[in-house]
Amino acid sequence: MSGGRPRSAFGLSFDPRALTDLLQAPSDIRDLTLAYLQDVVNGQRFGLRLTGDLEGYRKLFVDARKDWRVVYGLRPAPENAVHQREIYVVAVRPRAGNDVYDEVGRRLGMSRRPLSARTHAARSASPQLAARGPAPRPGPLPSATPGLPRAAPVASHPLSTRKSPSMSRDSASAAARRVLSSLDSRIEAATGHVVDTLWAHRDRSVLDEPHSGLVDRHRELVQAETGVTFYRTLLNRLSSGEFPIDTALFSRIERTVKQLRDAADVRDAAVRRVLTALAPIEATASAASGAAAEEISTADQAALLAIAGGAKLYEHLLTGRLAVTAASGTRIPYTELQRLISGGLVSVDTSHPVHAGQPVSLTDAGRAALAAGRRPPSAGVQTVAARPGAWPSTPAPRR
């Protein structure tokens, strides 16, 4: 083996749901998967080819009992990537009940369960060929010849006879669509929509050109974040004390640090592209909020009234989402808080940690706007309410 530092042969990318699979897998399965994927990226390990509907993809046996599988494919890398091709991990799931292959089919957009080449060949054979053979002779019962294989009963399609054990987890898999990035809150504040909604609108081609470009750049950023997360987790495993301290370990740590540095450079470049696409949208949003600052909507008045009774800004520990929780129990979205801050109506005390709660209070302009919004409108003529049962309902003016 040469003394030079080995360079990875391929790039690495994850389906966001596959990264969730990896983080939710048992610790030993996660460690073995990280080690095997590093060998695959370096061109030192190749999985077995899949056939049938999953032709073009490969599988890796993770554990010794072959209970867990990693399904990945080789595809062209993005234009600005270091490598020309990249390893795309689709799923990291158990083999029991074809769970991994059923989930791969759903993530690839297949309308039915993926079938192997052998199953395709068996289904394409004519059923009349078996009827032309000689009639079977009567033989002993299967219990009398335990060494002979027994004929399996003919069953219909598995989806029509039983329910896949992973079907109940469709909603959980769909919820983990992507990983979080550092610019999610800023994008949501500028556009007024959550990132998942923007992604769905982009898939349906209902966004204009600036917002479509922003979503495309954000997807590149999310993909780069998965690479950083992968190599950071791998580096944490190498430095956990599990492996003996020798020259081989130092080489692996040095190689992983270099790969983590490259992934961070790709992530930083993606951040710059997102900021470039976000700048005109933020300018338009700030101009629109400045034009509408004179008139406060009913929703803003309700938010100011809730904040007046005491409120704090919290960050969710799992999702990283920001939201304001008032003392009355009212929850105010972070996008609405950003709009109130830009209008100079509220202020946030950032001296406290956001996970413990940052106090949110009204400014002088906010209190004045709230008082003006709650003041009853003045009328030139005072109307007199009609008595119950009186007629006509509107009293006639007196001369």
Image (cartoon, grey):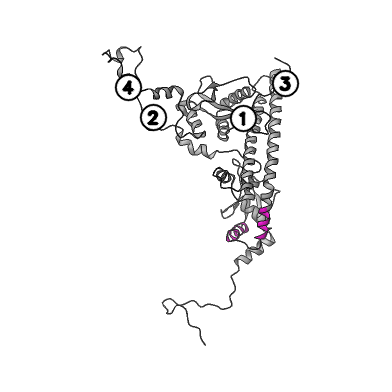
Mark toward the viewer: 1 or 3: 1
Q: Which residue is mark 1?
A: 76
Q: Measured from the top left, where is residue 115 in percent x and y?
A: 45, 27
Residue at x 57%, y 55% (from the top left corner): 328
Q: Are marks 1 and 4 in contact (CB under 8 Å)?
A: no
Q: Earlier in the sequence, mark 1 or mark 3?
A: 3
Tell me how far mark 1 sits from mark 3, CA to CA.
Answer: 24 Å
In the structure shown, which secondary structural element does the residue marked by tag 1 occupy? strand
In the structure shown, which secondary structural element does the residue marked by tag 2 occupy? loop
Tell me how far mark 1 sits from mark 4, CA to CA.
Answer: 45 Å
Mark toward the viewer: 3 or 2: 2
Residue 25 counted in the magenta span: no
Prevailing secondary structure class for the magenta stretch in the rendered image: helix
Q: Which residue is mark 2?
A: 157
Q: Amino acid at mark 3?
A: Arg
Q: Which residue is mark 3?
A: 5
Q: Is residue 135 left or right of residue 309?
A: left
Residue at x 72%, y 21% (from the top left corner): 5
Q: Is residue 348 above or below residue 381?
A: above
Q: Measured from the top left, where is residue 151 in percent x and y?
A: 34, 18
Mark toward the viewer: 1 or 4: 4
Numbered range of the magenta stretch:
284-308
Whether residue 207 is visible, yes or no, is yes
Q: Measured from the top left, where is residue 150 in percent x and y?
A: 34, 17
Q: Earlier in the sequence, mark 4 or mark 3?
A: 3
Q: Which residue is mark 4?
A: 128
Of residues 152 and 207, the one nearer the viewer is: 207
Q: Could you classify mark 3 by the number of other residues whose Cα lies within 10 Å: few (under 14), some (14-19), or many (20 or more)?
A: few
Q: Amino acid at mark 4?
A: Gln
Tell me how far mark 4 sits from mark 3, CA to CA.
Answer: 62 Å
Q: Amino acid at mark 2?
A: His
Q: Is residue 334 above or below residue 392?
A: above
